[in-house]
Image: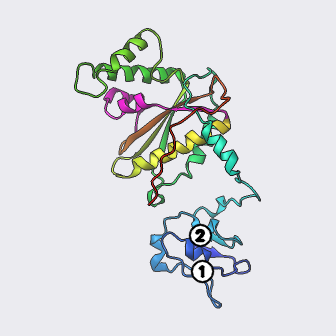
Amino acid sequence: MNTITIDSNACTRCGICSEVCTGAIIEPADEETLPTVPDEHAGRCIQCGHCEVFCPSQALLLNVRPEERVTLPAGAGTISAEEIGFYLRKRRSVRHFTTDPVSKEKILGLLDIARYAASGGNGQPVQWIVVHDPEKVKKIAGLTVEWMKTLVKTAHPMSGYVPGLIAAWEQGSDVICRGAPHLLFAHIPADNPVASVDAIIALTHVDVAAPASGIGTCWAGFVAMAASSFEPLQQEIGIPAGRKFAYAMMFGHPQYKVYGIPRRKPLEVTWL
């Protein structure tokens, strides 16, 4: 099967597909030929899709599930610099949630967006576990507290900090998951040395896209620390064999709305 197919009637021989190909495997068109990927270079295609989506005349089709091709409607995804600035600046880590569950359909929509996050070599190594049952979220929070108890009076950097968290939990305050109804876990191949970065990028896509769907998020740092080493919690999460935990995020419908933008440290930039 050809790596790419070209509509000869639509191709303008502009050469953009060759220029943007991340593997430099597309031979440019000339007056006699269309763009092509020689058979000996086909194995170097990482299926990123740059050639297809940057084609101005949409004459090129990458032969990766071609039936799923989506053509952007005119103006789709265009956001002004001012609007995207306000959208990102008003993003907050949410620690107060309603009890209304987020539908599985809406969650799948967010994760579908995260499929398009950048990854090394377009490897797309990130997979997901969604804890949708609030009772299971509470159990995971409790196991995180059990992990904290193992740190008391040890050399761990959290040793002096966890007694207060443990006491608050035992007094009925959920200082771990903040009453979030859901948790999201990203997991990656155990033998991939760069996939942890890919997971953070994908989770950031979820974090940024969530408010547009009325969903609040918060990076679940305590759960993430516990899940990286505490076997009872790892067993509860159920990471598949050959894969490892990357990070966690709590989410749900925010209890409160955002009406302003808080201050941040001054911008510091070094120009070279």
Number of residues whose C-alpha sits closer than 10 Å to that of mark 2, classed few (under 14), some (14–19) or many (20 or more): many
Q: Residue at x 70, y 80 (%)?
A: 12
Q: Which residue is mark 2?
A: 51
- Kindly tell me whether residue 2 is visible in this rendering: no
Q: Is residue 160 left or right of residue 74?
A: left
Type of amino acid under label 1 = Pro
Whether residue 244 is situated above or below residue 15 in the rendered picture: above
State the mark number for residue 35.
1
Rendered location of residue 18, percent (x, y) = 56, 76
Tell me: residue 152, above or below residue 35: above
Outermost residue, bottom direction? Answer: 32
Rendered location of residue 182, percent (x, y): 54, 28
| Secondary element at image label 1 | loop
Q: Is 199 displayed left or right of 232 in the figure?
A: right
Magenta-highlighted residues: 214-239
Quarter of the image for residue 29 reads: bottom right
Q: Residue furthest right?
A: 74
